[in-house]
């Protein structure tokens, strides 16, 4: 296991874990409850840490965290409803006319 990220900001660490999880990299959070000791323990010891389970994933995990994602998001285009044929813009997941959900 290797540490790939640490912060005093709990939300930032959980967001980083979610980014890795979306890319199939298993990771665990450590020291999450040490923030309560802040002031009695040096702040550098109270940082919440994110560790990857497999050392082989560490380099890729660091790249993902540096750039926000491993691969760029593909621009999604308009789509046609499979049920009624109505055209909808990319941001919609359900047809406004018949209520059918988008099938990708």
Image (cartoon, rainbow, N blue to C red):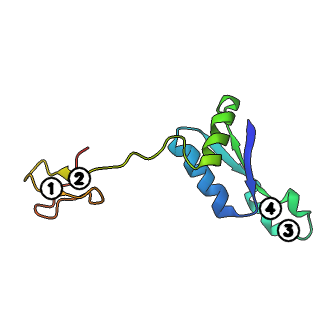
Q: Position of residue 54 (x, y in %)?
A: 67, 32
Q: Quadrant of residue 55?
A: top right
**Looking at the image, is mark 1 or mark 2 earlier in the sequence?**
2
Do tag 1 and tag 3 residues touch (Cβ < 8 Å)?
Answer: no
Earlier residue among tags 2 and 4:
4
Instruction: Name the element at disc 3.
Output: loop
Residue topped by disc 3: 38
Mark 1 in CB contact with mark 4 (< 8 angstroms): no
Q: Residue at x 48, y 44 (%)?
A: 72
User: Looking at the image, is mark 3 or mark 2 earlier in the sequence?
Assistant: 3
For label 4, the SS is helix
Q: Are marks 4 and 3 in contact (CB under 8 Å)?
A: yes
Q: Which residue is mark 2?
A: 78
* Residue at disc 1, secondary structure: strand
- The residue that mark 4 highlights is 34
Question: In 3D space, how far apart are the residues under numbered discs 1 and 2 (Cα atoms)?
Answer: 7 Å
């Amino acid at each position: 296991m290797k540490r790939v990220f640490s912060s005093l900001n709990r939300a930032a660490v959980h967001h980083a874990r979610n980014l890795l999880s979306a890319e199939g990299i298993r990771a665990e959070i450590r020291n999450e409850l040490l923030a309560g000791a802040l002031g009695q323990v040096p702040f550098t010891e109270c940082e919440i840490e994110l560790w990857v389970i497999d050392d082989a994933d560490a380099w890729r995990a660091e790249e993902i965290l540096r750039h926000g994602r491993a691969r760029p998001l593909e621009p999604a285009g308009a789509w046609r409803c499979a049920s009624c044929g109505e055209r909808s813009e990319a941001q919609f997941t359900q047809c406004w006319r018949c209520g059918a959900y988008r099938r990708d």
